[in-house]
Amino acid sequence: MNPQNNMEMSETMPEASDIVVAKKFLDFMVDYYALTRRHTIETNEYRTNSHGFSMLYVLSNYQNQPITMSHFADEMGITKQQLSKLVNDLEEKEYVARAHNKENRRQVYISITDKGLEHLEVMIGELLHEVMRALSGFTKAEKKKIEKSAVTMSELFQKDARLYQEKRDEKNG
């Protein structure tokens, strides 16, 4: 076999270890989802896995910088139409606000309002209470493992978000 063909195959075919990691990650995602469903009382308007909660949570990180609807739709992984419907619902509740760019009226910015931040704080407080209740069944050592794993996963997911943003910027730039 030609070394060039071998290199091309290795770039397109996942290694067996990648498949194992992907399967374990999928198992984790399903187990995590089941845990949150078992222990979370949905007292909030929006479930933790809903776009509404995610949108408010992510928008709270953009309090000091404007973000366009298009950019935010990309970041959320939803279509612009889905985002528009969601923004309409959240804007009606006064949780988010829209503002048009003065030079280009087609460019629309969204931001979380003070009322949205207050609502998000209440939701986070309720969720933290439920998570703490779920964690109460674990030993101190198990909680330390969960903490360490959560920090590691969060760091890796943030790296993925940065790489995704860089690729999108290269494509659009």
Image (cartoon, rainbow, N blue to C red):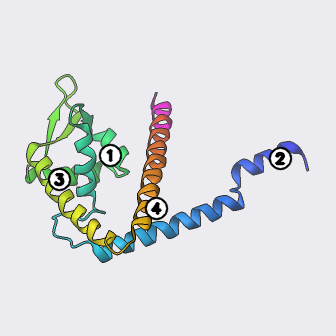
Residue 53 higher or lower than 27, as above or below: above
Residue at the extreme front of the image, as rendered: 140
Point 68% across, 60% down: residue: 17
Point 14% across, 57% down: residue: 122
Point 27% across, 36% down: residue: 68
Residue 132 higher or lower than 98, as above or below: below
* Residue 95 in sight here: no
Q: Amino acid at mark 1?
A: Ala
Point 41% across, 57% down: residue: 147
Q: Give the mark nearer the N terminus: 3 vs 2.
A: 2
Name the residue that disc number 3 marks: 120
Q: Secondary structure at mark 2?
A: helix
Name the residue that disc number 2 marks: 5
Q: Is residue 11 left or right of residue 98?
A: right
Q: Amino acid at mark 4?
A: Lys
Q: CA distance from mark 1 to mark 2?
A: 39 Å
Percent from the top left, x then y, of residue 70?
Answer: 31, 40
Q: Give the mark nearer the N terminus: 4 vs 1.
A: 1
Span colored in magenta: 167-173
Count all numbered tags in the image, as a single digit. 4
* Residue 5 in sight here: yes
Using the image as rendered, state which of residue 129 and residue 168 is in the foreground. Answer: 129
Name the residue that disc number 4 marks: 145
Q: Amino acid at mark 3?
A: Leu
